[in-house]
Image (spheres, rainbow, N blue to C red):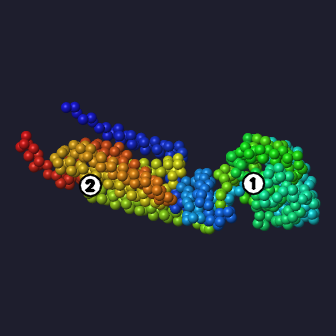
Amino acid sequence: MAAAPRSRPVLRLVTVLVVIALSYVLMATQNSWLPKLGLDLRGGTTILLTARNVDPDEGGSIASNSLDQARGIIQNRVDALGVGESEVTISGGNQIQVSVPNMQRQELIDTVGQTAVLQFRLVYLAQPVQAPMEQPSDEPSGEPSGEQSQEPGDDGSDQPSDEPSDEPTDEASGNNRPAPQLPTVPPPSAGSEDADVPVEETLAWQPTEADYQKFLAYSCDQPREDFARQSLVTCNEDGTEKYLLGPTLIDGDQLSKASAGIPQGSVEWVVDLEFKSGGADLFGQATSQLSQQQSPMNRFAIVLDGVSISAPEVNKPITDGRAQISGNFNQNSAQQLANVLKYGSLPLAFEISSVDTVSASLGSEQLRAGLIAGAIGLALVLAYSILYYRGLFIVIAASLVIAATMTYAMMVLLGEAMGFALNLPGIAGAIVAIGMTADSFIIYFERIRDEAREGRTLRSAVASGWRRARPTVIISDSVQLISAVILFILASGAVKGFAFTLGLTTVIDLIVVVFFTHPLMELLIRTKFFGKGHTLSGLDAHHLGVDRRPRTRLAKGRA
């Protein structure tokens, strides 16, 4: 009869240790030693948005798919920021709740609260707005000041460009401010204010006397009346220049691409836009007409939520469907604007109902409480192991250390790879895993005791006990893993953190028991302390409830 193949416990132990070592080497290469923490542990912001119907055709109710579409757009915006464990959920029939860890209040409001209605409008009148702290000028407000007119090239007309660009910076204010040119009597309007007019009529539109008077009376702190098919009086973001703009020529949904970057040979951040074919044709017609006009009517305004974020001059027709927004951008503001434009406009208008901030100090207290709870659970398991299993406590303690080391490494690596963030329910899942791991030990050790009671030697009991305990351990962990997967799929919010951590620790428990606990037990049973059943080993006959002498004499008699 052929001998059974010998197991290789040393090889399996070395394999586990090598895997752990490689995990920590990978952590070192990424210079990442701490897991990402969730909103409830490291602090963050939760904002509640309430949708209000802006379409009278809906009869005062929110469209069935509009709220879900808005949720998806907001989720994309938040995810594009690269923050882990962000939650965007629908609450009730008209609210969206956004929770993002480690993000400032105003930054979150700017990201998710704006409707991002993007428009391209033609500029008809432009006038610099005097800063509040500047000395009032004696000249009429409709004419440039002496300080502005003495700067050569202030209108930038001597600098041709294939793409629209902002005006040269005025040294006095640090803002892009072209010299204003206001007609004394504007020509009559040639288009309708309410109708969806063809592009030819939009390009031919001219302001009325009422538009002109509204423009002169407007100040940048006044609310804006933004209707796509009517004129718009607004200011730039800095409030240093106001404009009279024509009806919307191109809507934001004609954009196919928006990205932030620094052009080659430049040091300033810009946002590059690319139009769809229809928008590219409209943009080509508009820039062909604008390039033949005098300032300010050779400018077009890029309007976001009723505010002009850029109003560059056009010196040449742009027919390739590409435009560029430049100005006083930094990396964060350029990327944020590109993300908002890239993921589209919200289909609903929202009011900010509440903004709640979880402080980092509160999160640290919760983390400390969770760690204390985990330490108490671990201490109870170890105390039970010492009292009941004596020397086998070494196996249990070593296995728990290996499991904890692997779990920590996986949490750190998954945080870097897929944005996994450890939250308070996740810590609860890790604490539950301590009991699950202890349960695997109990199944194995009790099976060894059963085999020893049947008259097997200790070394044989370890081998046969593992063969019989292994299916039970695998089935138990499999059931737990399936439960975690189902909970992760069906749950939402922070409960997903509990399910994910529970599933992760279940897989690690199975790996540790198979590739570490059993091989370690095989090696220890070969030693005199455990193999001979020392009184303190936990494998002595009295502790196992086995009296071998009668069985030995009975066996000899039968022989």
Is residue 148 among what the camera can see?
A: no
Q: Nearer the viewer, residue 542 or 468?
A: 468
Position in image of residue 488 (x %, y %): 46, 54
Question: Which residue is label 2 attached to?
Answer: 389
Q: Residues within 10 Å of mark 2 (few under 14, many from 20)?
A: many
Q: Quadrant of residue 386?
A: bottom left
Is residue 474 among what the camera can see?
A: yes
Position in image of residue 136 (x %, y %): 88, 66
Furthest residue in direction left, as rendered: 557
Position in image of residue 71 (x %, y %): 59, 57
Residue lying at 46% horizontally and 56% vertically, measured from the top left: 490
Which residue type carries mark 1? Gln
Position in image of residue 313 (x %, y %): 83, 49
The C terminus, quarter of image: top left
Residue lying at 47% horizontally and 58% vertically, measured from the top left: 491
Task: Classify mark 1: helix, strand or loop.
Answer: strand
Residue 119: mark in rendering: 1
Q: From the viewer's perspective, is the residue at label 1 or at label 2 nearer? A: 1
Estimate the spatial distance between the alpha carbons at disc 1 and disc 2, rounded to whole Å: 74 Å
Q: Nearer the viewer, residue 68 or 238?
A: 68
Question: Is 287 situated left or right of 269 in this image?
Answer: right
Question: Is 554 situated left or right of 191 in this image?
Answer: left
Residue lying at 55% horizontally and 60% vertically, measured from the top left: 89
Residue lying at 85% horizontally and 47% vertically, measured from the top left: 289
Task: Classify mark 2: helix, strand or loop.
Answer: helix
The N terminus, quarter of image: top left
Residue 240: mark in rendering: none
Question: Is 194 situated left or right of 345 in this image?
Answer: right
Dot 1 and dot 2 residues touching (CB under 8 Å): no
